[in-house]
Image: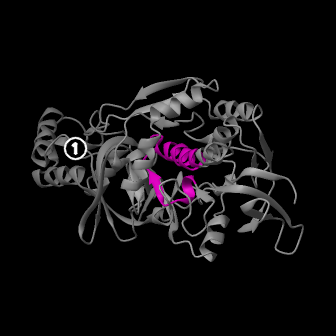
Amino acid sequence: MADFYDLIIVGGGASGLFAALEAGQAGLSVLLLEHNDTFGRKLSITGNGKCNFTNLYQARSCYRGSDPAASYEIVKRFPPSEIMSFFKKIGIESHERSGRDFDELGRKYIYPASESAEDFVNAILISLSETRVKMKTRINVLDFSREYDTERGDYISVVTGLSEDENRYSYFGKYLILATGGLAAPETGCSGNVNVILHKKGVKQVKFREALTRINVKEDIKKLAGIRIVGDLKLIGALGVRAHEKGEIQFGSNSVSGIPAMDLSTFAEEGDNLSIDLFPEMSEESVAGLLYTRREMLKSRQSVTFFVGLLPQKMGPYVLDLFSLSHDTPSSDISDEKLAGMAEFLKDMELLVTGRGNFGFAQTTSGGVLLSECTESLELKKIPGVYLAGEMLDTDGICGGYNLTWAFASAHAAAGDIINRFKRDKQ
C-alpha cells in the first residue's frame, strides 16, 4: 500500500487549513489535498482583504440552516475566545472593531492586527510547514470509499485523477475530513463536486443557493446607484414579513446590497416585496410633519434643492420624479397631498424582488449536507471515519465573521474528535 496517513483532508480553504494545522500540531500524519494551485485562495480575499475572522457577539440567530441550534452548539464548543487564542499561538494578533450605532446586535468584529487576509493565510502556511502535514495542490478528487484489511483495520481510500479513466491515483488514511466549500465565489475554485459524490452515496442535502449576496429588484433604480443610507429593511412574502434587518443599505442599478440586504438575501425569493424604511427612528406622521416644516422654511427654493441636507444627493431628484414634480417648481407650491405621499414613500419604499445575486456575487453558500446526517463531531453516520466541515454543511452565518467562525468551529469539531481517538488508541 502507498503512503498511509492518519488523516486525509480534502480542501485547502479555511476549514481544511485549520483542521490540518490542529491535527498536525497534535502529531498526526496529515495529507492536505487542494484542487487549486494555491491554498487559502478564498480566505486570502475575505473581508475585503482584511479578514474579519470571528465576532465576539454570538447567538443562535447568527446562524441559518436546517438546524441552527445544532450549528450553534458546535460554535459554543469552540467560541471566538478560543479561536483567537489558537491563532495567537501561531503569531496572529487580533484586534476588535465595534459596529456602528445602528448595529442593534452590538457585534464586535475581530480582525488580524495586520488587517491582511493574505498575512492571515501566510501565518497558517508557515505554521503548517512546522508540522507533519504534507500538502498537495492541483489534486482532483473523484471518489472515496471505506475499506478494510487485517493489518490496518478500517481505513479510507481517496481516488484522485483527471477523470474516471485517466491518471487515477489513490491515497489512503485512517480518517478523512471533507472541507471543499460550497459554490460561492466560483473564481476561487469552488465547485461543489464533493457534495455531488456524497449525494451519490445517499447523504441527504439541501440544494446549494446563494447567501450574503445582493437582492435584485424589478424597478429601475440606477439613478440611485452608489447611494449608501441607513434604513430598516423588511422582506415580505405571501404570508407576511419573512425577515427583517436594519443597517447601511447600498443601492445598485437594479439591486440593493449592504450588510442588511445581504443578511436578508438568504431568504429572498422572486416575487417577494422588499420594503425599505429610510427614516426608521420616525413615524410616518413625523416624517410628513418634517416635510411640511421644510416647505415653509425653504419656500423660496426650487424643489430640486428641497431634500438637500435631508437625503443623499441623488435621492431627492429621484423622489421628485417619482411624484411628477418639475425640478424648478417652487418648494412652496408642493401640495400637502404630494408631501404626504413622499412621507409614505420614505417610510415604505417598496421594491419587487426578482431574485438574488448569483454565486459570483455571493460571499457564502446556504444549503449543503444536513447536520442530521452527522454526529455531534460531524462524522457521517452513513460512512464512519469520514467527517465534514465548513461550507459544505447546511449552515451559513450572517455578515460579520460568522461564516469563518463556523468554518473554524466545525473543523475543530471534526479534527478534535479524530485527535481524541488517536489519544485513546495510544492509552
Instruction: Give yes or no for residue 412 being in the magenta stretch.
Output: yes
Residue 142 shown left or right of residue 62 in the figure: right
Determine the residue located farthest toward the right in the rendered image.
167
Q: How many marks?
A: 1
Quadrant in the rendering for residue 25: top right
Residue 118 position within the rendered picture, expressed as x and y whole percent measured from the top left: 67, 34
Tell me what residue is drawn at x 30 percent, y 42 percent.
304
Secondary structure found at label 1: loop
Residue 50 position within the rendered picture, expressed as x and y whole percent measured from the top left: 57, 33
Q: Indicate whether 53 appears above or below 255.
A: above
Q: Dominant secondary structure of the magenta stretch?
A: helix
Residue 396 position within the rendered picture, expressed as x and y whole percent measured from the top left: 46, 54
| Residue 139 shows in this picture | yes
The residue closer to the viewer here, 11 or 4, is 4
The residue closer to the viewer here, 411 or 148, is 148
Quadrant in the rendering for residue 157: bottom right
Tell me what residue is drawn at x 71 percent, y 56 percent.
174
Q: Indicate whether 157 appears above or below 413.
A: below
Q: Identify the image's colour scheme: rainbow, by chain, secondary structure or one colour.
A: one colour
Name the residue carrying label 1.
280
Bounds of the magenta segment: 389-417
The residue closer to the viewer here, 274 or 425, is 425
Residue 317 position within the rendered picture, expressed as x and y whole percent measured from the top left: 33, 47
Question: Quarter holding the C terminus?
Answer: top right
The residue closer to the viewer here, 189 or 359, is 189
Tell me what residue is drawn at x 84 percent, y 66 percent.
162
Label 1 crowd bin: few (<14), some (14–19), many (20+), radius 10 Å: some
